[in-house]
Image (cartoon, grey):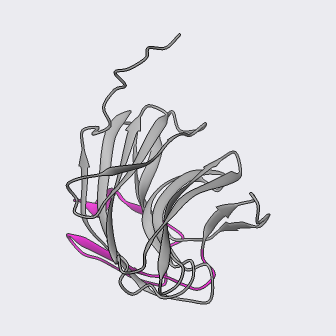
Amino acid sequence: MNFDSFKWIRKPVEFRVESDWIEITTEPHTDLWQRTYYHFQNDNAPVFQMETEDKFFSFIVKTDFSKSHHRFDQCGIVLYLNSENWLKGSIEYENEAFQHLGSVVTNHGYSDWATTEISADIKSMWYRLSRREDDYCIECSKDGITFSQMRVCHLWEGAGKISFGIYACSPEESSFKAVFTDMNITECAWKPHDGQQPD
């Protein structure tokens, strides 16, 4: 994948961009979250992404977070429009027993978090972000072949030109190396709905 079209939002102090992989070393107290429940607003995580006006596509990436070790350490996919409109999918380290596989969608300055607990032994995960106009699907896979749906969502500001890519952060006093490989853009793998028709 050609990274020449990618741009940093909040470039990290330490990172590497090679022809087929990217490594981000997270900095402490970096995160993406807006208001809901916690009431704070964190908008300082590094994001590496590209722009598109394509209404139908899928973006795939493999993440390796074997070095994560502290609560909330995370890395994954992101679609970042601005501080109050974005989505992300990732695994957040919790402790030596389990971690959280989940996604956050932020519309007009309010975030929500959908999550499930998975074993802490899992150290890598594939993600696939698919777009159908202003609706989006986030999926995950352990092998890059069979993907499972994590979330279907709508972005109120996501109908026109968007930006999407990867991110990594450590919300608490931590730092780790996140590695991203096998990035690819394909035709939309999220097929049109073939069930009940609209009213």
Please determine whether, in this image, residue 84 is positioned above or below residue 95: above
- Is residue 10 in view? yes
Please determine whether, in this image, residue 191 is positioned above or below residue 31: above
Residue 94 sits in quarter? bottom right
Tell me which residue sits at (61%, 36%) in the image: 156
* Label tally: 0
Q: Does the magenta stretch include residue 21?
A: yes
Q: In which quarter of the image is the N terminus?
A: bottom left
Give the side of residue 8 with respect to residue 61, left or right.
Answer: right
Give the side of residue 149 with respect to residue 92, left or right.
Answer: left
Tell me which residue sits at (71%, 51%) in the image: 110
Tell me which residue sits at (43%, 17%) in the image: 196
Q: In the rendering, at what x and y percent does residue 160 appear?
A: 49, 34
- Is residue 167 in view? no
Q: In the rendering, at what x and y percent does residue 184 appear?
A: 24, 55
Q: In the rendering, at what x and y percent does residue 52 appear?
A: 39, 43
Please determine whether, in this image, residue 164 is positioned above or below residue 199: below
Q: In the rendering, at what x and y percent does residue 79 appear?
A: 48, 52
Residue 67 sits in quarter? bottom left
Query: From which residue to which does the magenta span run?
Result: 1-30
Between residue 102 and residue 20, name the one nearer to us. 102
